[in-house]
Structures are given as structure tokens and as C-alpha cells.
Image (spheres, rainbow, N blue to C red):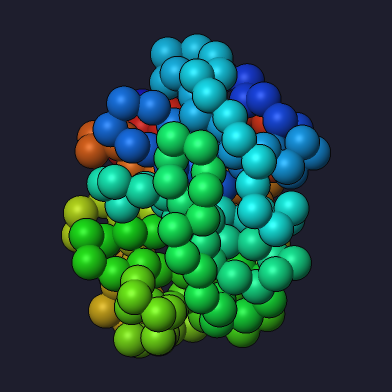
Amino acid sequence: MALGDVIRSFASPGGSITGLAWDGRAFWHIGRTTDLIYQLDPRDGSILRSFAAPGGNGTALVWDGRTLWHVDATTALIYQLDPRDGSILRSFAAPSASCGGLAWDGRALWVSSIPLLLICELDPRDGTIIRSFAVPSTSPRGLAWDGRTLWHTDASSDIIYHLDPRDGTVIRSFAAPGSASGGLAWDGRALWYADFATDLTYQLSMV
């Protein structure tokens, strides 16, 4: 298998899926058609639980070890959510009105801004921008942190990029199995991609 080849996939509920997060046992994603956030069994995508997404136009999710973070394009807010029922623990302004991806590196949030064409590292206490760098293409979407580096999808190029978090240098890249407009998650060993166009979640080869 080559880098980015599909190992397996499963259908995701909700329609027009965005965002993807891994909590150590299960995946989470947003169904834009239903405005629900779903927790999914990684074996087959079956629904374990769901609750309403705040704002109604969610674009990204990430898990920080205890809670979910969620960004909404309409409210331009980043929310910290209780994963049991989706209740809002706190919120603060996103860097822009439309953000396509969220990642968590153990201490800070990362967000991709579509109108600014930037990836920003944020202080999770209040959203202050710690640093930022330009994205490699023109329609930034999903983000994932693999323990050392960032992975990023771009909807205009349909490419998944592997990035140096210090300055955004492209380490390597490959074609996405779908439109590259969905979410990314790292499960500790493999990269997963949820595609907006096909409503499929793919496990991708890292070879």
C-alpha cells in the first residue's frame, strides 16, 4: 500500500458530514443536514449517541482528552462541549467567521481559517492567537495532530497535506479519497478522513 491508500471505510450518518474527532474509543462527527453531533462505533460507524450541535452550522470537532471542541461558521465561535450531552462549558471567538478544521496538540488548539487562509495556534483559555502560518492552498478544511506534526485537508486541491507545525512547511502530500472538504482525525496509529461529498469515513494508509 502507498501513502493515503484507503484501508477501509464506513458510511456516516447525518448527511454532509464535517469534522472528525477520536476520543480513544470512538469517533465523533457533525451531520450538517441534521445539525447533530454523533459519536460513532469505529468498527462500522453505528451511532452510539448524538446531541444537537450549537450554532447550527458546525464545521469542525476535536477531542482534548476530556471534552469536545466545536467550531461553528454562523456564530464564529469555538465551543467547549460536555461529551455526555453537548452542553456548552465555555466559548470564545474564532479567528474568522468560517473555520474548516480543529486540532488539539495536548496544550493548544489549532484552527484553519478559510477566509484568512491561515492555520492558527490558539490559547484554549480565550482563543488568543499564539502563532499562525499560511495554508498550502486556497480552501483550508480539516486538521489533525499526530503527536508531532499536523495533517490538513484542502477542498480546492483535493489534497491532504502533512505539515511542519513550526511554519507550515509541507512535509509530504497525497490525493484525498473524496473532495478533501471534510474532517481529519489521528487515532494514535492511523489517519482517518471523513468526506463531505460521499458521507464516508476512511482509514488511510500511512506507509
**Residue at the image position 42 percent from the left and 20 percent from the top:** 42
Q: Quadrant of the N terminus?
A: top left
How many marks the image carries: the answer is 0
Residue 193 x, y percent position in the rendering:
50, 39
Quick check: 148 left or right of 51? left
* Observer-nearest of 55 and 24: 55
Q: Residue at (64%, 62%) from the top-left corner? A: 72
Residue 171, quarter of the rendered image: bottom left
Residue 121 appears in view: no
The one of 140 and 73 positioned closer to us in this rendering? 73
Q: Quadrant of residue 99?
A: bottom right
Task: Tell me where residue 41 appears, x and y as whole percent.
Answer: 45, 18
Instruction: Please indicate whether residue 65 sits to the left or right of residue 176 in the image.
Output: left
Q: Nearer the viewer, residue 198 or 13?
A: 13
Q: Nearer the viewer, residue 8 or 129?
A: 129
Residue 11 in the image, given as x and y percentages of width and height: 63, 20
Quadrant in which the C terminus appears: top left
Residue 155 occupies quadrant: bottom right
Residue 58: percent from the left, percent from the top?
66, 54
- The residue that appears at 65% across and 73% down in the rendered structure is 76
Residue positioned 31% across, 52% down in the render: 64
